[in-house]
Amino acid sequence: MPVIIFGLTAIGLYLSAGVLLARRLFLRQDLQNAGPVAILTLSAVSLAFHAVVIAQAIFTAEGLNLGFFHAASLVTGAMALLLLGAALLYPVENLGIVVFPIAAIGLAFDLIVPPHHIVVERRTIGLDLHIIFSILAYSILALAATQALFLAIQEYHLRHKRPGGFMRLFPPLETMERLLFHMLGLGLFLLTLALIKGVIFLEDIFTQHLVQKTVLSIIAWIVFAILLWGRYQFGWRGRVAIRGTLIGFAVLLLAYFGSKFIGELILG
C-alpha cells in the first residue's frame, strides 16, 4: 500500500477523533456510542498508520532524514502517542481536541512537502538516545503546554462563576494542576537527559549551527526548573503555573523548530 494512503488514512482518523472530542466538549453530548474508548481506539489506529509514514520517511539508506516537516511530523506523532498512553492512566483524553488536529496537520505537511535533510550519517547508540530523549522531551512538554491552555480556560470559567457547560467534562482544577506538574516533571527529566547526552556525544554543542538551539534549550530548562521548584517550595499554581509553562515551551519551540525553520526553509 502506498505511503500516501497510510498518511491520508491517519489524517482522517485523527480528525475524526478530534471531531468526536469537540462534540463532547462544545455540544455537551455524552456520546455513549462514541465515548473515550472509541476515541482512543481511533487515535491508536491513526498512530499505527502515522508510524508507517514516519519510519519510511526518516530512516533512509543515507542516514536519518530529519528535515523540518519530518521532525514536526515525528514530534506531533509522539505527542499523540504519549497522550494515548497517559489517557489510560489519567483523565487527559480531552487534550486530544488540540493534539489530534495538530498531529494531522503535521502529517499533512510532511506528505505535501517532504524535506531532505540528512542530520545523522554515522549513527551511534549515544546519538540515537540524544535524539529519542529530545523528541520525547519536546512532546511531553508540548502536552504540558496544551494542559496549561485547558487549565487557563477552566480557571477563567471558575473565576467568572461559569462552572457549567463543557467544564463538567474536565477533572477538578486541583487534579488538572497536579497533572500539569507531573508532565512538567517528566518533561524536565527527559530534557535533562537530552542535554547531557548532547554534551557527551556531540563534538561541540556550541558550534555555530547548534549554539542557538543549545542556549535556548538551556533557558527553557531553567524556566521549567524554577517553576517546579516554586511549586514545591511555595505552592505556585494557577496563573503562575500557566504562564511559566507557556513561556518555557515557547522558548523550547524556538530552540528546535525556530532554528530548523530559519536554517532549512529560509537560509536553505
Image: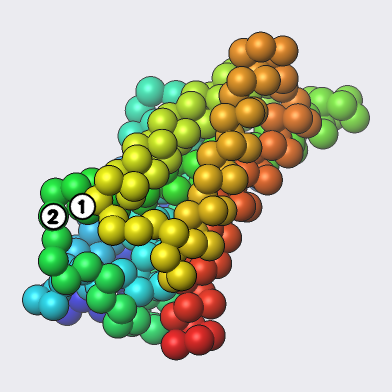
Dividing the picture into quadrants, the one containing residue 170 is top right
Q: In this view, does 231 lie to the left or right of 33?
A: right
Visible in this render: residue 216? yes
Give neighbour class at mark 2: few <14, some 14-19, many 20+ (Cα, 10 Å): few
Callout 1 amino acid: Asp
Q: Quadrant of residue 81?
A: top left
Considering depth in this image, is 42 or 253 the residue closer to the camera? 253
Point 66% across, 12% down: residue: 233
Q: Percent from the top left, x then y, of residue 3? A: 21, 75
User: On the rendered structure, is 127 left or right of 83?
Assistant: left
* Residue position for label 2: 124
Tell me: residue 234, above or below residue 208: above
Q: Return the x and y of residue 78 as percentages of the image width and height.
A: 35, 50
Estimate the spatial distance between the alpha carbons at disc 1 and disc 2, rounded to whole Å.
6 Å
The nearer-to-camera label among 1 and 2 is: 2
**Compared to 58, does 263 lie above or below?**
below
In the rendered structure, the answer to whether residue 69 lies left or right of residue 265 reads left
Lateral position of residue 28 relative to residue 66, left or right: right
- Give amino acid for label 2: Thr
Can residue 40 be spotted in the picture? no
Which residue is identified by label 1?
A: 128
Q: Residue 258 at x, y = what percent?
A: 55, 67
Question: Number of callouts in the render?
Answer: 2
Q: Are marks 1 and 2 in contact (CB under 8 Å)?
A: yes
Report the front residue among 261 and 11: 261
Q: Which residue is drawn at 59% across and 24% down?
A: 228
Q: Which of 170 and 203 is in front in this view?
A: 203
Q: Residues within 10 Å of mark 1 (few under 14, many from 20)?
A: some
At horizontal 82% and vertical 26% (from top left) the residue drawn is: 158
Locate the N terminus by quadrant.
bottom left
Give the secondary structure at mark 2. loop
